[in-house]
C-alpha cells in the first residue's frame, strides 16, 4: 500500500505552518500545523473547538463554499486538517489566512455553540481561540504555494 506523505513526516522535526498532507485526484488535504509536535504544549480542547466552529462558519459564506469538504481537529491537538476540492493552492492558503484573521477579530456568540447544534456546547473558549489565531497568523502571514511541501528531511 502506498503511504501518504504525512505518514512519513518526522513529527519531532515538523514546524508550524500549512502543508499538503495528500492529494487524491481533485481533493487536497492541508495539514494546518499550529504546534510543533512533541515540543510544545498542545492546544486546549476548548480553543480548538471554538476555532473549528468559527472557521467553519466563515468558510460556509465564501465564494467556493461547496468546494470545502472538511475542516477539523487533529487528534494530537497540534492543528487541523482542511480538505478542499478543485481549489488552487493559492486560493486555499488565502482562505486559511482569511479565516484565521476572522477568528482573531471575532466578537460575539460562537456560531453553533448551543445545545441544538453542538455536542459539547459548554467546551468553548473564545479568548484562547483568538490568541491561537493571532499567533498562527504570524506564522503564515507570508506563506505561499512554495511553502506547502513538508520540510526536507521530514520524508
Image: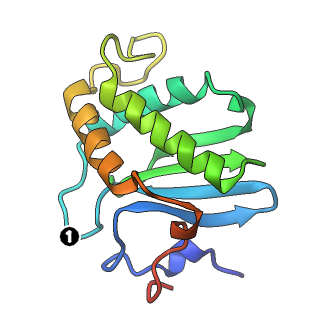
Quarter of the image for the N terminus: give it.
Answer: bottom right
* Displayed quadrant of residue 70: top right
The chosen color scheme is: rainbow
Q: Can residue 142 be seen at all in this image of the molecule?
A: yes
Count of marks placed on residues: 1
Residue at the far front in the pictured view: 142
**Residue annotated with mark 1:** 39
Residue name at image x 45 percent, y 84 percent: 154
As helix, strand or loop, the secondary structure at mark 1 comes to loop
Q: Is residue 153 depicted above or below 4 in this figure?
A: below
Residue name at image x 33 percent, y 39 percent: 48
Image coordinates of residue 138 in percent, x first then y, are 30, 51
Q: Can residue 75 be seen at all in this image of the molecule?
A: no
Image coordinates of residue 120 in percent, x first then y, are 35, 24
Q: Nearer the viewer, residue 143 or 82?
A: 143
Image coordinates of residue 131 in percent, x first then y, are 22, 37
Amino acid at each position: 500500500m502506498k503511504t501518504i506523505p504525512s505518514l512519513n513526516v518526522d513529527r519531532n522535526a515538523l514546524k508550524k505552518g500549512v502543508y499538503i498532507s495528500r492529494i487524491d485526484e481533485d481533493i487536497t488535504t492541508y495539514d494546518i500545523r499550529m504546534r510543533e509536535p512533541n515540543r510544545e504544549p498542545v492546544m486546549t480542547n476548548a480553543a480548538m473547538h471554538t476555532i473549528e466552529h468559527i472557521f467553519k462558519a466563515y468558510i460556509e459564506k465564501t465564494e467556493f463554499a461547496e468546494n470545502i469538504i472538511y475542516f477539523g481537529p487533529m487528534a494530537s491537538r497540534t492543528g487541523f486538517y482542511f480538505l478542499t476540492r478543485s481549489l488552487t493552492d493559492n486560493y486555499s492558503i488565502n482562505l486559511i489566512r482569511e479565516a484565521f484573521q476572522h477568528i482573531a477579530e471575532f466578537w460575539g456568540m460562537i456560531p453553533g455553540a448551543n445545545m441544538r447544534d453542538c455536542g459539547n456546547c459548554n467546551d468553548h473558549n473564545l479568548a484562547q481561540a483568538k490568541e491561537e489565531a493571532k499567533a498562527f497568523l504570524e506564522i503564515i502571514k507570508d506563506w505561499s504555494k512554495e511553502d506547502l511541501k513538508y520540510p526536507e528531511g521530514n520524508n
